[in-house]
Amino acid sequence: MTLNKKPHIVVIGAGLGGLSAAISLATEGFSVDLLEKNDKVGGKLNILEKDGFTFDLGPSILTMPHIFKALFDRAGINMDDYVSIQTVEPHWRNFFEDGSTLDLSSDPEIMQQELLKLGPNTPKEFARFLAYSKKLCEVTEDGYFAQGLDSFWELLKYYGPVKSLQEFDVFRSMDQGVKRFIKDPKLVDVLNYFIKYVGSSPYDAPALMNLLPYIQFGYGLWYVKGGMYGMAQGLEKLALELGVNIQVNVEVKEIQHEAGYASAVRLADGSVLKADIVVSNMELIPAYKELMSGQEKEIKRIEKYAPSCSGLVLHLGVDRIYAQLAHHNFFYSDHPREHFKAIFHEHKLSEDPTIYLVAPCKSDPAQAPEGCEIIKILPHIPHLDPNKPLTAEDYADLRERVLIKLERMGLTDLRKHIVSEESWTPVDIQAKYYSNQGSIYGVVADRFKNLGFKNAQRSGVLKNLYFVGGSVNPGGGMPMVTLSGQLVRDKILADLSKQ
Ligand SMILES: Cc1cc2nc3c(=O)[nH]c(=O)nc-3n(C[C@H](O)[C@H](O)[C@H](O)COP(=O)(O)OP(=O)(O)OC[C@H]3O[C@@H](n4cnc5c(N)ncnc54)[C@H](O)[C@@H]3O)c2cc1C
């Protein structure tokens, strides 16, 4: 196939990965159609206004804002004119069953005082851990992120075998990496729980994932003023100004192809849209299953890129204020191993889950009516598994267990104060975003399954088909999927320059 100088690109899906790809490619002068099946852009970065509350349905923590800024910078635009962000303090408040709490803060003085609560040596241990985390982060940024390295072999070639094995700490689990430095079991649990950013288990994920604390401490923890959805709106505005043709309520049903190249997409209304290049923000495995036939061999090859966990997402509007909460809170399980084993090995609901609770009104009271606040609760739970199906009753039982645990741990009468509720199970998440088995972060990071890698962005099936988002490198979470959109631009430009 001969490509025009500036080929026409169709992007399937307007999640952050698709938006970032569309913006990055339009900035280079490509004509881009961005097709989204839902009624608005943003994908899992989603919003719902109900009963006077504004619920951010997806992400609540923004990290690495420079990755978002890079989209605006390259287009010659100041991000501050489109999206306003603010830092959040403390980063997290951690609650334990014995009634103690521990704040994580970007302020070294406060952090020192908090760590001293755990013993005189803890600040030193933490400082050594953070230096290790920083090193992991720097080595990853240098090649994997900046160069868009897309396989273990590319990594070996770029870094050399010794650096790859030693500096990425490949033989340890995340938990083992934490325990090299930290003795206090509570702090071990807290640092292990940074795995929440990628929906995996610290006992299975490679120690490389210990880069996550440095990402938070080094680059800060941010909130988008007026609600997280503001990031999707800012990116949508930028995309439109760059000439991206965004169409919502448009579902792609098929990627058509000839002689090993994608040639068009067929839409739900039967119409066909020609394309020189296709970028899919639909996850890899669902795309091969639903949009192309005969891909069983490729699907088998990429099975190791299994889904991350899902979540039971409870958005509660309550008619009182819980003063003890910070913006971000974690209520720990006394049995973390059992909790992660239940999710990732037994595919059942944890009896005693660690609970992530977001109270966004602490930074942004306007999200709820006066005297009220939002309590968003997100215990991680297994992705959908046809061999171990969970029922609506199972999810309802977990909801009750979680609310009772929170009441026991200080949120007095929580259930009595609920005046509005919106609950999402993995079934809803799968149906809304077509994620693989209801996963919320794309691919699980598991050193035995995939060394923490995701599939390559270039399709192994069609030469001009590429993927962005949580199912491909560099992985899930807001900043990573946004980076994937920028890296796909680089790959497309490199591939075109060879033709
Ligand atoms: C409850 C929750 C909490 C989270 N918390 C955080 C957090 O605090 N911080 C963080 O960084 N990350 C968080 N995440 C993860 C983060 O939201 C995701 O990693 C990221 O938004 C995924 O972006 P994406 O572009 O890969 O995919 P998606 O957002 O899923 O976008 C894919 C888009 O493609 C569309 N699509 C799929 N198939 C088709 C088709 N055939 N035709 C047309 N359109 C199609 C979908 O409708 C969707 O809009 C959270 C996620 C959830 C659900």
Image (spheres, rainbow, N blue to C red):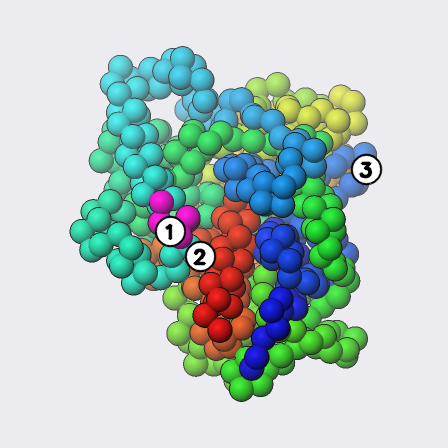
Q: Nearer the viewer, mark 1 or mark 2?
A: 1
Which of the two labelled residues, at mark 3 and mark 2, occupies the earlier sequence position?
A: 3
Q: Residue at x 60, y 69 (%)?
A: 5
Say if 232 sits above or below 261 in the image. above
Whole-percent x, y for residue 240 in the image:
74, 51
| Quadrant for the N terminus in the image | bottom right
Say if 387 sits above or below 2 in the image. above
Q: CA distance from mark 1 to mark 2?
A: 9 Å
Q: Place residue 274 in its image quadrant.
A: bottom right
Q: CA distance from mark 1 to mark 3?
A: 44 Å
Whole-percent x, y for residue 278 in the image:
60, 69
Which label is found at residue 222? none
Which of the two labelled residues, at mark 1 and mark 3, occupies the earlier sequence position?
A: 3
Task: Give the left or right position of residue 385, taking residue 21 as reference.
Answer: left
Which of the two labelled residues, at mark 1 and mark 2, occupies the earlier sequence position?
A: 1
Which residue has dot 3 on it?
A: 51
Question: Which secondary structure, mark 1?
Answer: helix
What amino acid is found at the position of numbered circle 3 in the picture?
Asp
